[in-house]
Amino acid sequence: MSHARARRRDRRVYLLSHPVLFGLLAATRAAPVRRVGGTVLVHGRDAYAEALTRLPLDRTAEGTTGGAASRLAGGGLLFDQDGDAHRRTRRQVAELLGAAGTDRLRPVWTALLAERLAPLRSGGAVDLVPVAAELAGATAVALLGLRVPPVALAAAARRVGATAARAHLPGPHRLPGPHRARTERRLAEAAADLAALAGGDPLAVMLAVAAVNTTVAALPRAVAWCADARLWDHDAAALAGELMRVVAPTPLLPRVAAADGTVGGCPVRAGDRLALVARHAVGAHTRDPDPADPAPARVAHLVFGAGAHACPGARMARLQLTDVLAALAPHRPAVVRARADRRAALPGWASLVVR
């Protein structure tokens, strides 16, 4: 078993999607916490968890997940709430994505996998990116009780995610002027299209964007790693946990401090930007996936956040990847063609063909 090829391939999605950003993160990762101007880069595991569980965070600041959610759907969402409102929405989402909700939705994606992966039985090829997008869209449609084509919902959610991500990255579109106006107009148009498909429900918009973009980023990358490292003989559930850790679908969590404090011993001022590097906190850059000797659960789960900032869809995400790996394992496919997505919200593949 060799992970070198898998790691080289996976590195491409970082280098081709956001090369400057991830170059900076790689150059500073030797220190658990490092300040660069008004931004605090958090790489260390303990510091990462501390920032999410002990430091007050501004849920509505520009450039954060909550700020993006507020702009897209008019506020009042999980990411931009505080106190009782935040707890109520978390309970609502937890009910949708908990054990009972996941069991109800599982037949949706397993049936789709059986149909879309059928060409592999006769030696055919399958592009896993559109499969992952349709799977995510079908799951979201069933979860939210919508009556729209899953592929259309997934496409709209991916467009919103990609446009929002570009709006938050450094560049001329962040400066007042025509570039910024054009970016904001495109984001508003994309959000309106998605809202129309989601019946105008802000919570549905937020869940669709989060679920679709993370699924489309995670599943093809995990399968590519599994194929390159020839991990098909391992238990699918154990393998899914380790692959989710190393691909870290959301490798960077942008946050803003709401009050003065410290993170990993580094003073933090209210208004400071925090770049919480999930990829480094879970050791994805140094520790290869090993289903026989996995990272502790408390470490692996950090890819989904921590405390009140943990992703409520973690269980479903792991189960979907488990079922994808189990469906592919009998065919032991190899990657025959891959193209990185330079425009997606999260590092991922635009196309990943296996046979």
Image (tube, grey):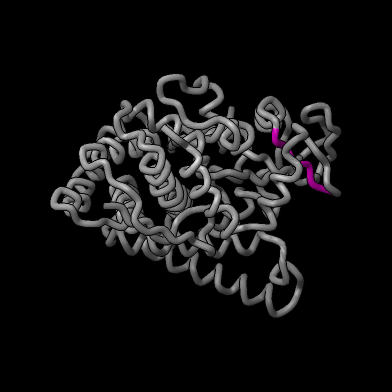
In the rendered image, residue 105 lying in the magenta stretch gets the answer no
Q: Residue at x 51, y 23 (%)?
A: 295
Which residue ends up furthest to the left in the rendered image?
122
**Residue 240: which quarter of the image?**
top left
Picture coordinates of residue 168, whole percent (x, y): 66, 59
Secondary structure character of the magenta stretch overall: strand
In the rendered view, tell whether residue 141 sits above or below residue 7: below
Picture coordinates of residue 227, whole percent (x, y): 36, 42
Mark count:
0
Using the rendered image of the protein, determine whether residue 62 is visible from the camera's viewpoint: yes
Q: Is 241 on the left or on the right of 119, as rendered? A: right
Q: Nearer the viewer, residue 234 or 37?
A: 234
Q: Is 314 on the left or on the right of 36, as rendered? A: left
Using the rendered image of the protein, determine whether residue 137 is visible from the camera's viewpoint: no
Q: Residue at x 58, y 34 (%)?
A: 309
In the rendered view, tell whether residue 343 sits above or below residue 42: below
Q: Nearer the viewer, residue 7 or 62?
A: 7
Picture coordinates of residue 230, whole percent (x, y): 36, 37
Picture coordinates of residue 92, whole percent (x, y): 43, 36
**Residue 223: which quarter of the image?**
top left
Q: Nearer the viewer, residue 218 or 125?
A: 125
In the rendered view, tell whether residue 245 sits above or below residue 225: above
**Residue 183: which quarter of the image?**
bottom right
In the rendered view, tell whether residue 44 sits above or below residue 12: above
Q: Residue at x 35, y 38 (%)?
A: 321
Q: Which segment is the magenta one?
A: 38-43
Which residue ends up furthest to the bottom in the rendered image?
178
Q: Is 239 on the left or on the right of 159, as rendered? A: left
Q: Residue at x 76, y 42 (%)?
A: 28
Quadrant where the N terminus is found in the figure: top left
